[in-house]
Image (spheres, rainbow, N blue to C red):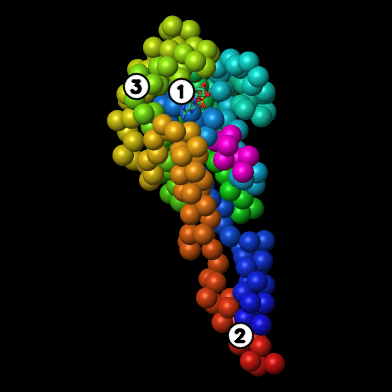
């Protein structure tokens, strides 16, 4: 009978009551953030991805509305003027921003939301949404970071240098993040990232008062 009460409450909690996790992930470009996010979302499809707007050109295989909303600079700046973004930043010479309406809508529904944003954006979100939980991913070394960017084959010599230079500045800000994970062995990093995410889903701040729910059920039963 006790099991039944717990089960009922658990269902109530998972279906109706938990607040959404706001999960921010930042890393120097080339660290493996997109790879790790892909793995995490494959295992947890309910973890919504905050699709950013950007003025950079699409890479091969990237789709408008799935990876990014690709906008020209004029359109991006017009939206920025209208307060369309929860945060925005200029990164490696392009603009990037998080649409506010999507965040507000999903958060109000209690859904989990993952942000793949740079350090400047993460710091802005920490201020406007203090309940965010943030992870900084490190490459095992700067040499390995360069190797990964070269292997990915998406950069020109100029953009490669910009990204490597940016990496040092980003790493210098890592202390602002709640969790630090080194992406050396991919599977190990994926496990750690998942563990951090799962821990957030059972954080008491996001849950209803389980003790009160259980007591109420018991009292109801006792009083017939
Ligand atoms: P980011 O999104 O951080 O810019 P990507 O996910 O695009 O980085 O990864 C950059 C490159 O590094 C890709 O070619 C990816 O396959 C590779 N990579 C990712 N994680 C690892 C890892 N742990 N070990 C070796 N290569 C990796
Ligand atoms: P990339 O061009 O490699 O997709 O992304 C470059 C950097 O921009 C990454 O660090 C990525 O996290 C960041 N980025 C992507 N979207 C946003 C966003 O909406 N806001 C901010 N501030 N950074 C973003």
Q: Nearer the viewer, residue 6 or 99?
A: 6
Question: In what quadrant of the picture does the N terminus appear?
Answer: bottom right
Dot 1 crowding, Cα within 10 Å, few <14, some 14–19, many 20+: many
Tell whether label 1 touches label 3 (CB within 8 Å): no
- SS state under label 3: helix
Mark 2 lies on residue: 218
Q: Quadrant of residue 2?
A: bottom right
Q: CA distance from mark 2 to mark 3?
A: 58 Å
In this rendering, does residue 187 appear at all? yes
Q: Establish if 140 lies above or below 135.
A: above
- SS state under label 2: helix
x, y percent for residue 45: 65, 44
Residue at figure coordinates x 64%, y 21% from the top left: 62
Residue at figure coordinates x 49%, y 15% from the top left: 151
Mark 3 lies on residue: 142
x, y percent for residue 139: 39, 28
Q: Is residue 129 left or right of residue 217?
A: left
Q: Is residue 173 left or right of residue 11?
A: left
Q: Check mark 1 vs ligand 1: CB closer than 8 Å? yes or no.
A: yes
- SS state under label 1: loop
Q: CA distance from mark 3 to mark 1?
A: 10 Å
- Residue 30 numbered tag: 1
Highlighted magenta segment, given as a residue range: 37-43
Q: Quadrant of residue 207?
A: bottom right
Mark sitting earlier along the chain (2/1): 1
Is 19 a magenta residue? no
């Amino acid at each position: 009978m006790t099991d039944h009460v717990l089960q009922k409450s658990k269902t109530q909690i998972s279906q109706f009551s938990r607040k959404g996790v706001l999960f921010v992930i930042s890393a120097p470009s080339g660290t493996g953030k997109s790879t790790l996010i892909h793995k995490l979302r494959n295992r947890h499809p309910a973890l919504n991805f905050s699709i950013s707007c950007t003025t950079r050109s699409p890479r091969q295989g990237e789709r408008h509305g799935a990876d990014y909303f690709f906008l020209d600079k004029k359109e991006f700046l017009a939206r920025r003027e209208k307060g369309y973004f929860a945060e925005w930043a200029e990164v490696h010479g392009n603009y990037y921003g998080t649409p506010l309406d999507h965040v507000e809508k999903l958060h109000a529904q209690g859904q989990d939301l993952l942000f793949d944003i740079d350090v400047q954006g993460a710091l802005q979100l920490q201020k406007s949404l203090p309940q965010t939980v943030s992870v900084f991913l490190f490459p095992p070394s700067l040499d390995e970071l360069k190797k990964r960017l070269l292997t990915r084959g998406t950069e020109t010599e100029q953009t490669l240098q910009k990204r490597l230079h940016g990496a040092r500045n980003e790493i210098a800000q890592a202390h602002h993040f709640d969790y630090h994970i080194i992406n050396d062995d991919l599977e190990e990093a994926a496990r750690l990232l998942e563990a951090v995410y799962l821990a957030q889903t059972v954080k008491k701040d996001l849950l209803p008062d389980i003790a009160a729910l259980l007591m109420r059920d018991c009292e109801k039963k006792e009083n017939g």
